[in-house]
């Protein structure tokens, strides 16, 4: 029996807490320098995509495990403040949650990241909550909690729920090709697509990724824009360059959340891509992956003021 739809997007991934500092330069050795701005903010590709989607008005739910420490509590409370349902974020007693330190270089927004994964054990298939995946329109993930991923994808497929995958830069592993036949929507960085396909050309890489099984492939490349490929459409969406960019942390994740929001609302693909590009650009005007997540009204105003990319 089909499940009633409760969520637009359910996300399976790992949440972190990020300590972000904007600095003049990355150190080459021992040094002391002053940060021009600092922020403590939740992170993680899937979690940030859900926060962006919720900010636009989508109904979202996060599936993850955190420790019962202050970091885990901060992660959950911030997601809740954006409107993300955290009922399926399990608290593991006595475990520490993931923490990352992110240095953002002032001159160009480049990032240097170090992280402590914490001691939370990965989700297993038996940890997946009943009904949440089946009640969503999309299951979004980036391959984390691999022991639970295939079960989650199968449950989604059996329930008629689309499976979305985030292939981030510097995160390609050859074994992740095994995910692709289970994926309906692949939104991947050019770096990921190139490593997967062997081609640096975005269009060729998109076609190669699509040949593995996804019905819709989006290849993102920062200021170069994004390439969208499906059975019914193929086009390039230019990026929106904003002069007051501060930090590009999480822009790809915001793109994912906004694109999937539009997709679940049955928008045409060109509108999905345009809104996603605008939301990502708008978020770059503050420190952190969730520093300036826009509402849908704000995105519409931005697009009126920037009719062309």
Image (cartoon, rainbow, N blue to C red):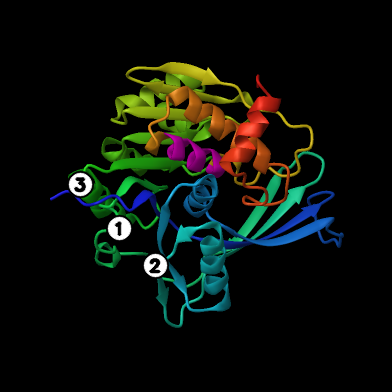
The numbered disc on residue 87 is 2
Image marks 3 and 2: residues in contact by CB distance under 8 Å:
no
**Whole-Å distance between the Cαs marked 3 and 2?**
21 Å
Element under disc 2: loop
Q: Which residue is denoted by mark 3 in the rendering?
A: 159
Packing grade of label 3 (10 A; few <14, some 14-19, many >=20) is some
Rendered view: 32 above or below 153: below
* Residue 256 is inside the magenta segment: yes
**Residue 80 seen from this side:** yes
N-terminal-most mark, 3 or 2:
2
Packing grade of label 1 (10 A; few <14, some 14-19, many >=20) is many
Packing grade of label 2 (10 A; few <14, some 14-19, many >=20) is some
Element under disc 3: loop
Q: Give x and y (percent) for residue 144.
A: 40, 54
Image marks 2 and 1: residues in contact by CB distance under 8 Å:
yes
Along the line of sight, the residue nearer the viewer: 149 or 47:
47
The numbered disc on residue 274 is none
Rendered view: 124 above or below 194: below
**Whole-Å distance between the Cαs marked 2 and 1?**
10 Å
The numbered disc on residue 132 is 1
Q: Extreme bottom residue here? A: 94
Q: What residue is shown at x 42% (from left), y 81% (from top)? A: 93
Rendered view: 301 above or below 6: above
Q: Main structural element of the magenta stretch: helix, strand or loop?
A: helix
N-terminal-most mark, 3 or 1:
1
Along the line of sight, the residue nearer the viewer: 23 or 78:
78
**Residue 27 seen from this side:** no
Magenta-colored span: 253-262
């Amino acid at each position: 029996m089909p499940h009633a739809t409760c969520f637009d997007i359910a996300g399976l991934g790992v949440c972190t807490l990020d300590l972000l500092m904007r600095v003049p330069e990355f150190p080459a050795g021992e040094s002391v320098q002053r940060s021009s701005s600092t922020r403590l903010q939740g992170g993680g590709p899937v979690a940030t995509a859900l926060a962006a989607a919720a900010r636009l008005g989508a109904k979202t739910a996060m599936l993850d495990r955190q420790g019962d420490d202050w970091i885990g509590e901060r992660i959950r409370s911030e997601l809740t403040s954006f409107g993300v349902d955290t009922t399926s974020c399990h608290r593991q007693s006595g475990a520490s949650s993931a923490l990352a330190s992110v240095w953002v270089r002032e001159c160009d927004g480049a990032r240097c990241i170090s992280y402590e994964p914490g001691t939370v054990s990965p989700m297993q298939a038996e940890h997946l909550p009943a009904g949440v995946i089946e009640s969503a329109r999309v299951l979004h993930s980036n391959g984390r909690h691999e022991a639970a991923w295939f079960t989650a994808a199968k449950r989604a497929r059996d329930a008629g729920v689309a499976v979305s995958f985030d292939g981030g830069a510097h995160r390609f592993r050859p074994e992740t090709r095994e995910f692709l036949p289970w994926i309906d929507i692949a939104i991947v960085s050019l770096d990921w697509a190139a490593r997967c396909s062997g081609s640096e050309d975005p269009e060729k890489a998109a076609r190669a990724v699509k040949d593995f099984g996804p019905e819709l492939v989006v290849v993102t490349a920062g200021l170069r824009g994004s390439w969208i490929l499906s059975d019914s459409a193929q086009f390039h969406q230019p990026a929106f360059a904003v002069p007051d960019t501060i930090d590009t942390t999480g822009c790809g994740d915001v793109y994912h959340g906004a694109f999937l929001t539009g997709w679940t609302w049955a928008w045409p693909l060109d509108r999905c891509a345009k809104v996603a590009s605008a939301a990502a650009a708008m978020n770059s005007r503050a420190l952190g992956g969730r520093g300036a997540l826009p509402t849908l009204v704000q995105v519409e105003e931005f697009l009126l003021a920037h009719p062309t990319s």
